[in-house]
Image (tube, rainbow, N blue to C red):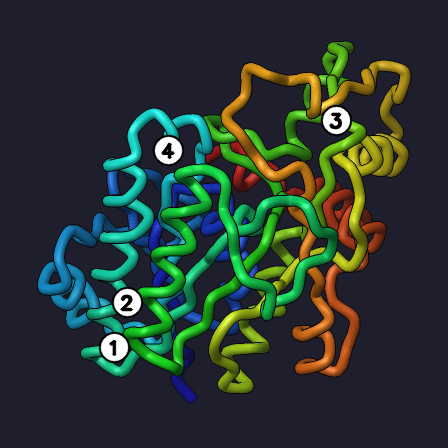
Amino acid sequence: MAKKKILFTGGSGLLALNWALLPADAYDVVLGLHKKNISVNNLVTMIIDMETITGFSAVLENIKPDIVIHCAGLANVEACEADPSMAYHVNVELSVNVAGACKMHGIHFVYISTDHLFSGKKALVSEDEIPSPVNEYGKTKLEAEKKILEISDRFLSIRTNFYGWGPAYRQSFSDMIITNIRNKKPVSLFEDFYYTPILIEELGYTVMELVSKHANGIFNVTGNERISKSVFGNRVADRFGLDKSLIRISKFSERKDLVKRPADLSLSNKKVCTFLNREVGNIDANIEKLFLQEKTGFSNIIQNV
């Protein structure tokens, strides 16, 4: 039986790199690249055109994927605020082009959304909550989500906040904690900024399970616990045997230099747990997997990209 083929957009990014290496045995994987050309672990990479529906349609005709996972986007909150038109182009227009072409070709499309869609005044927000983004990043991601789900009611939008191993040119939050403490550098972490992080390994397998069960619409695929950045950092330090005295506790509420963000990004994952009839995103289990990824050499593959 022939393997199904997955095309990842944003193939040089943290999410696509970690995710693409997971299903390599079960799927044929293509990393779609936009500006940055990379080579990784014998995976197929290809420069792709997302600037028009016609251009991406030609990509689909060439690659013939069964699933497109749209990881490409401008996720830097400051960059989005500084250039709203660029944020709209990358996060909305390109996403709509990719989704539109997938609709034309009858290809299952998965959009990676965000947890920055709400005001932060409520904890563990469900998929039914009315969004109220507070910055350009959140606004453009929400607009893209709305337009994509209007294109096809078969598409998936995944709201999430993930971490994993980053390449040399893009550290993740967990990388920053581990690398700095190992280098005897202090790390400042917010005690009043909350979220529900999930390891990309679990995020990827969970989304693929949703696809296999023909799920559609919006799903929060997140950790199962609302924690602060500082608590997360301390748990990572505990498992990796790091010197926690280098963790400095700070307050997000005192950082007036940052673009406005919701101080509570936490999302409820009850819907996905109910749909799949299992637990999703155990924080400590995910940190243990991160630890094992380093022990088995998985992290080196990505860090050497």
Q: Which residue is mark 3?
A: 190
| Residue 286 % position (x, y) | 76, 52
Mark 2, secondary structure of its residue: helix
Q: Which corner quadrant of the image does residue 251 belong to?
A: top right
Give the label, 1 or 3, closer to the camera: 3
Give the label, 1 or 4, closer to the camera: 4
Tag 4: amino acid: Cys
Question: Dot 4 surroundings within 10 Å: few (below 14), some, or many (20 or more)?
Answer: many
Mark 1 in CB contact with mark 4 (< 8 angstroms): no
Tag 2: amino acid: Ala
What label sits on residue 132 in the rendered view? none
Mark 3 in CB contact with mark 2 (< 8 angstroms): no
Left or right of residue 197, residue 160 in this image: left
What label sits on residue 99 in the rendered view? 2
| Residue 208 % position (x, y) | 54, 72
Left or right of residue 103, residue 282 in this image: right
Q: Which residue is mark 4?
A: 80
Earlier in the chain: of badge 3 and badge 2, it is 2
Q: CA distance from mark 1 to mark 2?
A: 6 Å
Q: CA distance from mark 1 to mark 4?
A: 28 Å
Picture residue at 81% right of the left edge, 16% below the top: 248
Picture residue at 77% right of the left edge, 19% below the top: 250
